[in-house]
Image: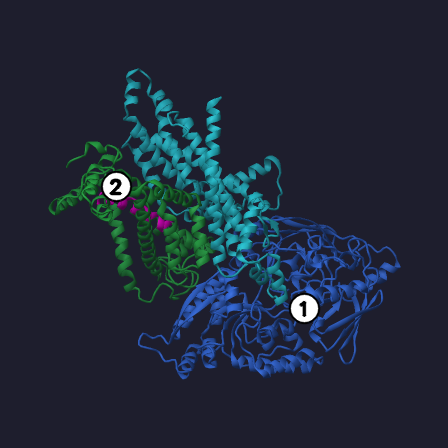
Chain colours: A cyan, B blue, C green
């Protein structure tokens, strides 16, 4: 079908456009990390608590740090092209494997957050917009305003105090009960329990954003010509809202969600730190302080790719929602 | 304990002369029963299991279960038999003959012989071990006249060397698996084969390591535990919670953060101990860069030593886990006579007054705004307590008119600044005295330890010919009394010169589940084999 | 007030008015702003915080790092908000933290705005290849997860007031650039601008005297929201330990107290509330400014 082919071509073009961007990002990060004094050899030797000059020279050689900068850079670029993201000497694992291991929890957290924040945001936005100026509208708006102003880490900590420490309904941190080695449905339940507080924390801010956006978007749409027309044709309010207005009003929300992916990744660094959630946000933070160069660059690379992929998906969803928009 | 035949029984008796009897007099309560799994939290996850190549802190916590050494140690800090059943030293101290235990097998079934000992010390530890290169500098050759005798030939006496023969510090590796290979890249690095009570089973990176009971262990009936699992939990909150819910049974070296220890030990079934670190002996310090103003002046250095309220630091930043330090050598060395407290005392009630006087004397009078001079204080980047310590130091210095700006950098940057560029004036730090002053103390005060680019040696740039001489003589003095006297003189001189402010002796803490018995049975603590640990339900 | 019929898409009114009309223009703006009760409340709170930030340090000259009393003193006792784990006065910390947050928020936003206006303005005015390249650059910056990048910058340059401000500026400018580019593009094609150019007026003059003044309201509104984001970002950086260790900040207070959540949860709660209130106030004021300056786009 030619529409499908158009779409495929569009995606291909977007991916091709993304390559130079990624290259630039990788180069920028490589330069930045090398700007700083100190390197991984220093860290490992430091952890050993003692080191002879021979040992340190050995470490430096192991990490290829005794090579000139441009050689290291070219080595790195060559490897990236073959999806070899290098070796993490701090963790003694290939970077690719390390990231894949930790990507899952982050995607789980982000995915849950997106569903929760968009879902609740859209619902609450519709709810508020259905009776503008009413008590429920005001209550929802105030809630959104306050959530939007609240720092992520603070919400997380306060939720821990209330639900994990005082009420003991939920665990304080981590992703699983670590001694139990659960499998199957038990594991799913265990992870779900641990997921509640981190996901709620991360969702609050974005939900507030989508509520406000959805609400104003709904109100804007309701005043439009096509709604008046539909009403005069005899369609029920219900049908109008859910079949027409909703579709158009969601467009800004979808756009915003796409734009926010980068922020969401940043937010997950904070939330993963507060809750000890074993994702790549926490990994990135630790890699930074361990000067684990390969790992850090690997994470940035994967994160940037993730953002680009999500943006392309969002654009495609956009065209599905509004057929008037052409796949230029 | 299942005794199969007369030979086993006699062997068990011979083994028990040094091993099963707890040297500090506390006997095992009841009869140890077979069974149980110990889950210990190890922080951070070790980068490798090759303890013969790396001295990174967490490695020893697990490697010591797999590898044995020639000796173990009792709480009097004396070596006792392990793989070596006895040893004799020649009168000039340059020849040590070790008799090796009979019937010891590696985990792959091959027998332990003196060839393994020779290979381990000459081809592995002397060449590649970060501390071994220095510790075994006097060792010239190891002879193996018969499979159960190893003769060490030294070019000078080395009394300190006897303290470095544990399975933690100097693990005996099987020659057959390493000889002729690239020792620094062996496949047995993370798949260790030793003679210890537990065999390595698997390592799931980021999750856990598993060690199962070695049924062929040379102490009959031991180990009592079926399995040891080392868990790696990155988050402090999670660790404390796991201890509470008994998901982990054991955490050492700060795995449970200090501020939580008090709360956890109030719970029934959880206890803590500061024993088992007597061969580590960390000291928290403030290091001066004595090459530059104002810390080239001993009066200024002594002033700052007076100004630090050691009790405040111990009580409020490390929650009581420490005791004020008096000098470069820890009071843990008291049993061996090396330690003395008969040195200049900076820990006095009128410290601030003394400090102000000294600074005035040194010519750094207060200006109109009350400050004498300004410095940058580099904080050692190893965690929250150190940040608090830096903030405290800034306030303590402010009280005596020194305006300190705190600089907090990450580990590699800090290491580069302090040990390569020497681009600092005052930094906080901590060194471990380790098993003997030659191994852990000399490196901070000797002229031959001022090595640009090498970490955790002499960063302050201080040394004197007199103290150099004392350290050199003490290193080869085999008479314990004479040796102690040399070190006493050394401590007096160093403390007078105050190139370092010795703030306090840090007490590491081990938090554990009380149903496990006989966990800490030697000054090596977690760095020992856990062969006699058992569960009492 | 004239509205140019050709500019239905551009959210902008007319060219600059002579001085007296500007005065009454301002008064009318204030009236519109004041009608929004929430915005007014936000302004009152914000002004209070600013006063505290300016005057407070003079009242507590000993500074927030002074070890003033016993550690973990409870609030509503000898110390109004208690003391922290080293015995520092929590109230003094809040006062000095206000100064830090506002200062960093304003300065970082100022730099981000300058950069955004410069890049966006050039892109929107000149169009063509320059526009294309600058937009690629902007896109690239928006692809990098901004908080991760900020952490990287601060950690590499070592935490200090300067590195924090730089990091926040560097990740905040893209939205401003996009906005300014859009405005400049629209205005560039307006008749009065074309007229000025054909009259021989230099580019600089056109931009400064005719285009820029018409973007001011959008820039101010976006700027106010950037300040709020900057304060949130700064507090998150401080919480993670990436703040200047010689400067007290609210995020730092929460981060330092995190270990003691079980024991003294108020040490985390109080600074967090301060951040919340400040950011909320700024958001309300920003919304109010938006309504006042762009009446046609006001939300229902």
Residue B57 visible, this orientation? no
- Pointer 2 chain: C
* Mark 1 closeness class: few <14, some 14–19, many ≥20 residues within 10 Å: some
Asked if C289 appears above or below B257 in the picture, the reply is above
Residue at 71% in and 76% down = B158
Q: Residue beneath label 1, please?
A: B133
Residue C55 drawn in magenta: no
Residue C12: percent from the left, percent from the top? 23, 38
Hey, which residue is sitting farthest top in the picture? A234
- Pointer 1 chain: B
The image quarter in which residue A261 lies? top left
Q: Secondary structure at mark 2?
A: helix
Real-space CA distance between mark 2 and mark 1, rounded to the nearest whole angstrom: 70 Å
Asked if C102 appears above or below B502 in the picture, the reply is above
**Which of C14/B103 is in front?**
C14
Q: Is residue C130 left or right of residue C2?
A: right
Disc assigned to residue C290:
2
The residue stretch that appears in magenta: C213-232
* Mark 2 closeness class: few <14, some 14–19, many ≥20 residues within 10 Å: many
């Amino acid at each position: 079908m030619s529409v499908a082919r158009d779409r495929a071509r569009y995606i291909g073009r977007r991916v091709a456009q993304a390559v130079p961007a990624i290259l630039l990002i990788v180069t920028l990060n490589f330069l930045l990390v090398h700007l700083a004094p100190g390197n991984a050899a220093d860290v490992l030797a430091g952890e050993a608590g003692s080191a002879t000059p021979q040992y340190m020279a050995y470490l430096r050689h192991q990490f290829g740090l005794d090579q000139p900068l441009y050689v290291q850079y070219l080595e790195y670029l060559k490897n990236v092209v073959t999806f070899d993201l290098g070796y993490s000497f701090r963790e003694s694992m290939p970077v690719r494997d390390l990231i894949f291991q930790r990507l899952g929890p982050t995607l789980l957290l982000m995915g849950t957050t997106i569903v929760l924040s968009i879902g609740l945001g859209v619902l609450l936005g519709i709810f508020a917009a259905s009776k503008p100026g009413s008590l429920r509208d005001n209550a929802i708006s105030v809630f959104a305003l306050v959530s939007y102003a609240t720092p992520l880490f603070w919400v997380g900590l306060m939720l821990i105090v209330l639900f994990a420490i005082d009420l003991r309904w939920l665990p304080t941190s981590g992703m699983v009960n670590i001694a139990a080695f659960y499998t199957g449905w038990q594991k799913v339940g265990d992870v779900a329990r641990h997921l509640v507080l981190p996901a709620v924390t991360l969702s609050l801010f974005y939900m507030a954003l989508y509520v406000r956006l959805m609400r104003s978007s709904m109100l804007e749409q309701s005043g439009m010509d096509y709604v008046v027309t539909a009403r005069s044709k005899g369609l029920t309010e219900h049908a109008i809202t859910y079949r027409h207005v909703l579709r158009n009003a969601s467009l800004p929300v979808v756009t915003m969600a796409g734009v926010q992916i980068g922020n969401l990744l940043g937010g997950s660094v904070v939330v993963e730190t507060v809750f000890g959630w074993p994702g790549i946000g926490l990994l990135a933070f630790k890699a930074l302080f361990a000067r684990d160069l390969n790992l850090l660059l690997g994470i940035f690379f994967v994160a940037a790719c993730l953002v680009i992929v999500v943006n392309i998906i969002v654009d495609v969803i956009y065209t599905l929602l509004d057929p008037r928009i052409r796949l230029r | 304990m299942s005794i199969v035949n007369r030979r086993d029984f006699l062997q068990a008796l011979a083994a028990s002369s040094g091993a099963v009897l707890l040297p500090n007099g506390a006997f095992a309560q009841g009869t140890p029963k077979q069974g149980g799994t110990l889950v210990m939290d190890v922080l951070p996850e070790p980068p490798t299991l090759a303890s013969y190549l790396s001295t990174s802190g967490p490695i020893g916590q697990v490697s010591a279960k797999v590898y044995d050494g020639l000796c173990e140690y009792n709480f009097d800090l004396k070596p006792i038999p392990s793989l070596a059943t006895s040893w004799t030293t020649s009168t000039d101290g340059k020849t040590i003959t070790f008799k090796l235990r009979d019937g010891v097998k590696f985990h792959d079934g091959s027998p332990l012989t003196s060839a393994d000992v020779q290979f381990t010390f000459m081809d592995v530890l002397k060449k590649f071990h970060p501390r071994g290169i220095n510790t075994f500098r006097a060792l010239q050759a190891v002879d193996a006249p018969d499979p159960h005798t190893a003769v060490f030939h030294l070019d000078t006496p080395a009394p300190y060397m006897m303290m470095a023969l544990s399975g933690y510090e100097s693990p005996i590796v099987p020659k057959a698996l390493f000889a002729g290979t690239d020792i620094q890249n062996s496949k047995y690095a993370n798949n260790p084969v030793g003679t210890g009570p537990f065999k390595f089973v698997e390592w799931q990176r980021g999750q856990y390591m598993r060690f199962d009971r070695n049924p062929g262990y040379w102490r009959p009936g031991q180990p009592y535990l079926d399995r040891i699992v080392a868990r790696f939990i990155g988050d402090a909150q999670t660790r404390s919670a796991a201890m509470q819910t008994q998901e982990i049974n054991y955490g050492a070296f700060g795995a449970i953060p200090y501020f939580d220890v008090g709360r956890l030990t109030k719970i029934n079934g959880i206890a803590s101990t500061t024993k088992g670190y007597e061969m580590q002996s960390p000291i928290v310090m403030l290091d001066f860069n004595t090459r530059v103003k104002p810390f080239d002046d001993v009066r200024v250095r002594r002033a700052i030593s007076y100004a630090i309220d050691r009790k405040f630091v111990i009580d409020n930043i490390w929650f009581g886990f420490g005791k004020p330090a008096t000098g470069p050598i820890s009071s843990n060395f008291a049993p061996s006579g090396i330690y003395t407290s008969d040195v200049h005392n900076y820990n006095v009630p009128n410290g601030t007054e003394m400090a102000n006087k000294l600074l005035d004397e040194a010519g750094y009078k207060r200006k109109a705004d009350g400050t004498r001079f300004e410095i940058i204080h580099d904080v050692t980047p190893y965690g929250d307590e150190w940040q608090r310590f830096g903030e405290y130091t800034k306030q303590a210095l402010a009280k005596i008119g020194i305006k300190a700006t705190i600089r907090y950098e990450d580990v590699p940057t800090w290491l580069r600044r302090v040990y390569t560029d020497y681009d600092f004036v005052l930094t906080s730090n901590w060194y471990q005295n380790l098993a003997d002053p030659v191994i852990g103390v000399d490196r901070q005060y000797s002229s031959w330890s001022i090595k640009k680019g090498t970490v955790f040696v002499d960063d302050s740039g201080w040394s004197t010919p007199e103290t150099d001489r004392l350290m050199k003589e003490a290193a080869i003095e085999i008479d314990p009394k004479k040796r102690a006297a040399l070190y006493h003189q050394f401590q007096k001189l160093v403390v007078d010169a105050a190139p370092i402010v010795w703030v306090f002796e840090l007490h590491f803490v081990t938090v554990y589940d009380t149903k496990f018995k006989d966990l800490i049975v030697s000054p090596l603590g977690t760095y020992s084999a856990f062969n006699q640990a058992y569960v009492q339900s | 007030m004239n509205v140019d019929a050709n500019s239905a898409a551009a959210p902008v009114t007319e060219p600059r008015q002579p001085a007296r009309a500007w005065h009454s223009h301002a008064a009318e703006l204030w009236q519109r702003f004041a009608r929004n009760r929430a915005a007014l409340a936000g302004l009152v709170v914000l002004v209070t915080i600013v006063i505290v930030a300016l005057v407070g340090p003079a009242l507590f000259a000993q500074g927030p790092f002074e070890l003033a009393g016993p550690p973990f003193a409870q609030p509503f006792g000898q110390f109004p908000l208690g003391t922290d784990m080293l015995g520092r006065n929590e109230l003094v910390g809040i006062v000095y933290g206000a100064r830090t947050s506002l200062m960093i928020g304003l300065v970082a936003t100022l730099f981000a705005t300058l950069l955004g206006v410069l890049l966006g303005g050039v892109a929107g005015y000149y169009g063509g290849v320059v526009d294309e390249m600058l937009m690629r650059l902007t896109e690239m910056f928006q692809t990098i997860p901004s908080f991760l990048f900020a952490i990287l910058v601060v950690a590499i340059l070592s935490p200090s007031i300067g590195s924090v401000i730089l990091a926040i500026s560097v990740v905040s400018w893209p939205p401003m650039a996009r906005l300014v580019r859009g405005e400049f593009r629209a205005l560039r094609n307006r008749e009065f601008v074309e007229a000025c150019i054909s009259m021989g007026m230099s580019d600089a003059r056109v931009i400064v005297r005719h285009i820029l003044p018409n973007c001011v309201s959008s820039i101010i509104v976006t700027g106010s929201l950037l300040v709020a984001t900057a304060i949130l970002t700064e507090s998150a950086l401080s919480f993670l330990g990436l703040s200047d260790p010689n400067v007290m900040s609210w995020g730092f207070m929460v981060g330092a107290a995190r270990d003691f959540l079980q024991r003294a949860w108020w040490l985390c709660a109080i600074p967090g509330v301060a951040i919340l209130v400040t950011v909320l106030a700024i958001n309300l004021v920003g919304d109010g400014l938006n309504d006042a300056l762009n009446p046609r786009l006001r939300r229902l």
